[in-house]
Each structure stands twice: as structure tokens, then as C-alpha cells.
Amino acid sequence: MVFSSVMFMYFFLPCVLLLYYVSPKKFKNLVILASGLFFYAWGEPVYVFLMLFTTFVDYMAGLFIHKYDKQPKKRTYALLGSLIINLGILFVFKYSGFVADIFGIDIETLPLPIGISFYTFQSISYTIDMYLRKIKVQKSFINYAAYVTLFPQIVAGPIVRYEDVQNEINHRKINGVLIGEGVGIFIKGLFKKLFLANSIGMLWSEVKAMDYSEISVVTAWLGILAFTFQIYYDFSGYSDMAVGLGKMLGFNFPENFRHPYISRSISEFWRRWHITLGSWFRSYVYIPLGGNRKGLAKTLRNLLIVWGLTGLWHGASWNFILWGLYFGLIIIIEKLFLGRKLKRLRPWVGNAYTFILVVFGWVLFDTNTLGDAVSYLGAMFGAGSGFLDTVGAYEFKNYFVLFILCAVGSTEIFGRTVKKLQRYYGVSKIMCYATPIVQAAVLLMCTAYLVDSTYNPFLYFRF
């Protein structure tokens, strides 16, 4: 079955929200749990039981840690049990084939459950924080399972730690203001996904399927720039939709993207891109390893470990591992000396430096093998069929306007323009009336696009 959460959100979301709003307060988490299980089973009818199993394991581990609060060994055993089971399942489904290939062992790999990396990290954050006494125990299995299966972000983030929503799981307010904000954020994310990510992504799909030794410099750069914008609008669009739906349900999910392509360094880029994943690794890997508190050598070691694991989290291949280490090494260089120099340069220099290095990174990220990555990078610098071919000329003309729209949309220009209009021309009242009209028009456009389109991949579902 082709998994389409966009279709689900469009055609099932009104029913879910209606049921949620009319349900008594004590049944709302049950509605969330049921809708989350249905949402996941829509694409993974078998693996939904796997998710329920790990949810039950972590729920019981939390109760055990709470019960034996004064007995360190038992608390540690409960935590280790949770980590071993969760990470063991993640290893079997996601990494066993990769490790077997390294040792020359031929095994049959299992299909990867959708979003397993997301909900695994989310669930074990609960047991770790329970162990660290940062949160209170959740005694209701329905409430805890509702947290894990929150359907807006269950398969592609943002990674919501229990600490982020522990109060809202038990007590949350739903009002017209939050619902209105949520609708606006959801529609923005839907537009980013359908009109920008899907449209520009078709170019990358064409170029990626070509023989890299026969493409021109222009074609190669157009292709990887298309993916650069596709992955941003695809992932940030889904995150916006999740945050918007969360507000409609009474939850305030953490921000996951903050205009990363305007960053002036790679370090800043990763403070703006997939923010919840970076926060997770910082809290549960970097700081426990010692962070930057034990001297320069160990700080650099910790950074390499974190970035190697970040790459591995994204996928079981050398491309992903090297992609993570690539950014880790750049961040180390910036930490040692380059970061200070970048701050003294004009902003556009830092913007260009960061954007180009990120583009090179995306080549590693979305090519199938290291050989493919090398071949593609070679084509970007003239190792293919020259500077410009007929394909490159045609695609440049065909996608020029879309590239401009994607580039402008990835900056803060639109947001700043609206704020300036409100500040200097007092158009806030006009905006109150115009905003719902614009949102309705965009929603209508998205509906028409969705009905007519068959190209709706979500890139981060495979992680």
C-alpha cells in the first residue's frame, strides 16, 4: 500500500477533529490514541503492533523506575531494559542488513517500519528523563500511548519529548485562537509540501535517474539545487502541518525549522535545521559524553561521535555516515578558528559559504552509493558532458521561476514584509479579514492539486 499521510490528513482529519472536539475531556486522549493507531496502520498494518510493544515496554519501564526511586540498581536495570529493547528493535530493522554486508554475511532484511527512528527516539526520551528525574511518571497507559502515537508527528517529527508536552498530556486547553493559529500553520505547511517540494522535486527525480557521466555542469547543479529545496520544503512543510495540527488538538509542539538556508555558518545551520533532532542528540549523547566540559580533545571527540550517529540515524549506509561526519568536521573547523573569521566577514559571504557546503552535503545524502556521490560531484565540476547541454537549457527555462520562488521563500523576506506593513501602515485589521480568505483560497488550490497529483512522497518517512 502506498502510504499517503497527506490524503489521510485531508479526508480523515475532519472526522478525527470533530470526534475529538465533541468527546468528553476524559476520552480525548483515547481518541488521540485510536486515531494515531489508525493513521499508522493506514501505511503499516502489521508494524503497528511493533510500535505498541515498544510503547508498552517504555510505559512499564517508567512505572518501574518510579516505583524503585530509592533503589539505584533496579532503576538502572529498568532503563537499560528499555534502551536495549528499543535500540535492539531499531538495529534489527534498520541496521542489521548494513552490518551483515560489512562482514560479508548474506541475510534477508526486513521492510523498514515507517518513522521507526522518530517514534523510537521519542519514546526512549521518556524513560531516560524518568531516570534523570526530570519528569513525573505517567501512570495511565492510554495517556502515555497517546503521547507516543500523536498522529500529526508520529512518522516524521518533529521529535516531541515527553518533557515538552507532559502538562498538556493530562491538562490542555482548546480554544478558537489556538485552532485558528493551527489552521494557518497547517495550510502553510501544506502549500510548502504540495506546491514547492513536489514541484521542484520532480526535477531532481529526472536528474537523479540520469547517467552522471553524461550530464552537464548546469544540469548537475540544477538537479542538486532542486533537491536542496525539495528536502527543505518537504520536511519543514510536514513539520508545519504537524505543529498546526498539534495546536488544533491543544498541544504546542517545538519548532523544527528556522529558515536554515540563511545561516552564516554550518554550526548555525544545524541550530536551524531539524532542531528537535539536534536537541535530542545534545541532551542524550553530547552532554552525557561530557560536552565541552572536559577539554578540547574530548570536545572534538564528542562532536565526531554525535555527528557520526546523526548520519547513522538517517540511514544504514556509508553515505549517511560520511554525510554526518562531513558536517561534524566542518563544525570542528569552525569551532577551532573558522567561526570567528566568518563573523568578521560580510553576511553574504557566510550565507554563500554555508549554502554551498550544504548543497555538497546533499549530494552525499541522496545518492545511492559513494561512487554515485563522487560521480555526481564530478559532473558538477565539469567531468560530465561539458558546461551546458540541451537538458540543462530546457530545465533552466522550465524551472527558473520556481527556483526564484523557492529561494525567496526560504528567507525571512515574507515574514519581515508583513510585519513592516503592520507596523507602518496599520493593516492589522485588514489582515484579520484577508488572512482567512487567503488561507481558504490556498486550501482550495492545495485540494485541487492533491486530487490531480500522483507525486506525493514524504522524504523523511523512510527514516
Image: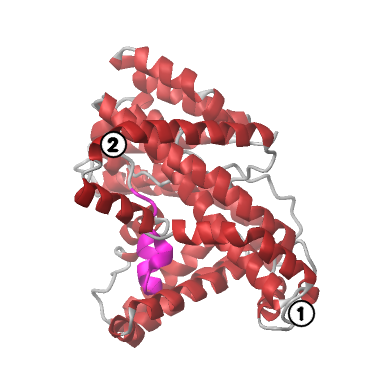
- Mark 2 Cα shell of 10 Å, populated few (<14), some (14-19), many (≥20): few
The magenta stretch spans residue 19: no
Q: Is residue 143 left or right of residue 191?
A: left
- Residue situated in front as seen by the camera: 373 or 432: 432
Q: Quadrant of residue 340?
A: bottom left
Residue type at numbered disc 1: Gly
| Camera-side residue of 177 and 324 | 177
Q: Label 2 near label 1: C-beta < 8 Å?
A: no
The image shows residue 326, relative to residue 86, as above or below, that is below
Queried whether the magenta region covers residue 257, the answer comes back as yes
**What residue span does the magenta drawing correspond to?**
255-272
Q: Give the residue type that dot 2 points to.
A: Ile
According to the picture, the residue beneath numbered tag 1 turns out to be: 384
Query: Residue 139 appears at what percent x and percent y?
Result: 29, 27
* Quadrant where the N terminus is found in the figure: top right
Is residue 290 visible to us here? yes
Q: Mark 1 and mark 2: span between their CA atoms?
A: 54 Å
User: Which residue is drawn at the image coordinates 34% and 49% (left, top)?
Assistant: 255
Q: Residue at x 39, y 49 (%)?
A: 80
Locate residue 454, reporting x and y percent. Answer: 70, 39
Q: Which mark is residue 430?
A: 2
From the top left corner, tell me how far across and down residue 70 is, in percent.
19, 43
